[in-house]
Amino acid sequence: MSGHVTERPTAPSPGPPAFGAALTRERGDFTWVYLWSAPIRAMHWLAALSILTLIVTGFYIGRPYFMTTGEASSHFLMGWVRFIHFTAAAVLVMTGIVRVYWLFAGNRFERLPALFPISPKNLRNLLRTAIAYATLRPEKQPNFVGHNPLQQYSYTGIYLLTSFMVVTGFTLYGQSNPDGLIFRAFAWVPSLLGGLQGVRFAHHVATWGFVIFILLHVYFAIRSDYVERAGGVSSIFTGGRYVPTNERYEDYNVAEVPATDWPTGESRAAPPGD
């Protein structure tokens, strides 16, 4: 034995993440955060199904993309499509009523301030988040357990778009009964949009707003789970997600709740030479 001690090579320290790369997180202490209550989750999926149904049937009503043979009275195709369209609209309105109630009855992530983050701090975080998204630098954006300000404003926008669609949609629906309550309640709308044809055109154009939102919503939800490892997609099923206790969040104080060990069954690889 020469007494010479061979130094064990150490793993190189990790550098900054590559441009656009997914963030990695060490396994350790996590805590469960309950985000979305059962009514919110149920209304989310009911609204999603209603909107998809409204888009498909609405485009058909505007310009039928397939036809059937025979007399219209025998198959009543357009009548059934319109019935499905109106039923889906009623379901969507119902989900909106429940959502309005939960703006006041929900938890901190569901209440009214979460839809209108207008404080100076939230506006700064909005800018930081937008820059991080635009430059594909997720490590630069502030951490949020719930929705970040960019997501909050996008949902506020879709709620306003939904309200517009409901008003114009009921205006068109009321034309079938000029003596009815719905016709009289929305009689003021055509004059604001240049007549009944303007209402139809605005209703059709706004439908494309839903189409664009759905594509972006699905993309960014999947991107967030992959790049940020945020668990946002699973939270709309389970109601919450695990967050590391060693990170700081803009909308949640992890120190207020006890940490829970996250058993993964994984072990860190030993350094070379062991």
Image (cartoon, helix red, strand yellow):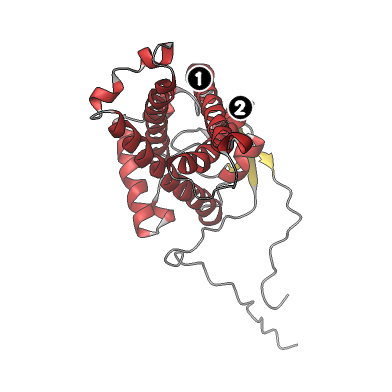
Quadrant in which residue 48 is drawn: top right
Give the number of the disc on residue 37: 2
Q: Nearer the viewer, residue 2 or 193?
A: 193
In the depicted structure, whether residue 170 falls above or below residue 133: above
Q: Residue at x 52, y 68 (%)?
A: 13
Q: Does residue 241 appear in the picture of this structure? A: no
Q: Residue at x 70, y 46 (%)?
A: 262
Q: Secondary structure at mark 2?
A: loop
Q: Nearer the viewer, residue 190 or 222?
A: 190
Q: Nearer the viewer, residue 98 or 192?
A: 192
Mark 1 crowd level (few <14, some 14–19, many ≥20, 10 Å Cα): few
In the depicted structure, whether residue 156 falls above or below residue 9: above
Query: Which residue was labeled with disc 1?
Result: 97
Give the number of the disc on residue 39: none
Amino acid carrying label 1: it is Ile
Q: Position of residue 53 (x, y in %)?
A: 55, 38
